[in-house]
Structures are given as C-alpha cells and as structure tokens.
Amino acid sequence: MEAIHVVIDDIGLISYSDAYQYQENIFNNAIKKKINKLTDNNENVFILCEHTHVYTLGKSGSEQNMLLNYIQLQAKNAEFVKTTRGGDITYHGPGQIVGYPIIDLEVFGFSVKGYVHNIEEVIIKTLKDFNIESTRLEGATGVWLDIDKPGKTRKICAIGIRVSRGITMHGFAFNVNTDLNYFNHINPCGFTDKGVTSISKELGEVIDINLVKKHLIRHFGEIFKCAILPK
C-alpha cells in the first residue's frame, strides 16, 4: 500500500478571517476532487499558524460566553467571529499554535471520534516531551491538566472541527506562549469552573514555539502513520 503523505503548510501569523478563507479553499477543493473521484491518498494538508487576537464561536456555542461588548473588544484589539466548527467560544492569539489538518478520514481509516482522539494524543505526547503530564476529560474535547483536582483543572489545548464527506476542517488551538489574560473575557469552551494554561505558564519560562512545532509534527506523523512532507 502506498504511504499516506501529509504536507505541512506553516503560514505564520495571520488573521483568523484570512486563515479561514485559506483553509476553506483547500477544503472545498478536496471535497470537489473527492466527489469527482480525482483524489488519491497523497492530498492531505496540515496547516499551522498563529492568529492575531480573535474570539471565535462554534456553531453550537452561546454568545453569552463572550463577556466583552463591541467597544471593549476594540480596546483589546480583538475580533469576534462566528465560525463553522463545532464547540463553543475560545480565544486565538500570538504564541498559540493553531493547527488545521485538512485530511480525508476515509484514507486514514478514522471515525470522527477516532480522529479527535488522535489529535488529543498528538498534543499529549508533545506535552510529555516538555515534562508536562496531560490527559483527556470525559465529556469534553481537548487536552487537560489535573483533571482529578477540583478547582485546579485547566485546559491547554482546545479542539473544534468540521467534517464534510469525510474531509476535515478547523482543528486545534494549543497554548504555548499565549497571553492567557485574554481568556478572562470569556467562559472558555463554555466552562465557568475550569481554567486555561500554557506550556510557558506551566514551566515558568518562554518556550521556543518552533521547537514545540517540531515535536508536534513528529508525533502527528507517528500517530497518523503518515509521511510528513514540507510544502
């Protein structure tokens, strides 16, 4: 069987709207090719980026979880965007690795649930490389710390996806050197009783985000059993 290839496309610091348009073009093209049976197993893309300050609301989320009004948002130099991913509200900003895998789940042999599980596993293994123990929280997607300590449970990576015809879009937001103060203005992912954290907060120092990306990409290749290619 021919190896599955995934192309890494690191587009750097970019507004959420521009990144959305960029990934949607790739996503729609992948669906069109699949409908016309023009695809093979080597047309998978994994976009990596950082966003300028933005709060995004998933299609199942509540605007009540945004605690700022329009004027306050402007003062924070932040946008507010309703999006097509699953999940509730979250924040994206500099120092956070945002990943948008656009892959065909049928090629990989994953269910949607299995796909999310594997994304979580990529983050868990990456954190372990930095001596941070993390896990899943039952009933909530993403990656969490100290789930057995009430009042101290905190999220380090949020996940929200969209799948159409087996093709994935959207993805995860992984806090590395993120300014966590921006999370004070929302109920992250709809939770009022859980906090957020980052690698830099846990370790007490600024982390080389490119080093984190290297570990993350390596684990993605291992867990998704694919060959990683640069763009």
Image (cartoon, rainbow, N blue to C red):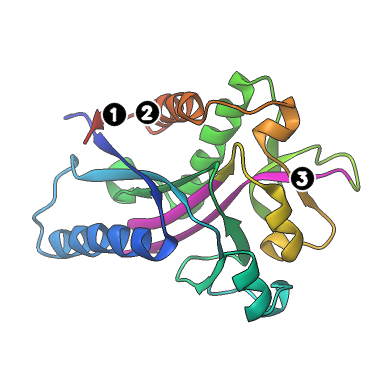
Instruction: Decide which of tag 3 and tag 1 comes sooner along the chain.
Output: 3
The residue that appears at 66% across and 32% down in the rendered structure is 199
Across and down, in percent, residue 22 comes to 28, 59
User: Which residue is label 3 attached to?
Assistant: 154
Question: In the drawing, does residue 130 fall left or right of residue 48?
Answer: right
Q: Position of residue 58 (x, y in %)?
A: 55, 69
The numbered mark, 3 or 2, whose residue comes first in the sequence reads 3
- Amino acid tagged 1: Ile
Identify the residue shown where x is 24% and y is 57%: 26
Residue 115 forms part of the magenta stretch:
no
Residue at the far front in the pictured view: 75
Residue 229 higher or lower than 10, as above or below: above
Segment tinted magenta in the rendering = 152-173
Packing grade of label 3 (10 A; few <14, some 14-19, many >=20) is many
- The circle drawn on residue 228 is 1
Secondary structure beneath disc 1? strand
Dot 2: element: helix
Count every numbered label the image shows and give the total: 3
The part of the image, by quadrant, that contains residue 153 is top right
Residue 125 pos. (x, y %): 57, 26
Q: Are marks 1 and 2 in contact (CB under 8 Å)?
A: yes
Residue at the spot 48% in from the left edge and 23% down from the top edge: 211
Q: Amino acid at mark 2?
A: Gly
Q: Which residue is label 2 attached to?
A: 221
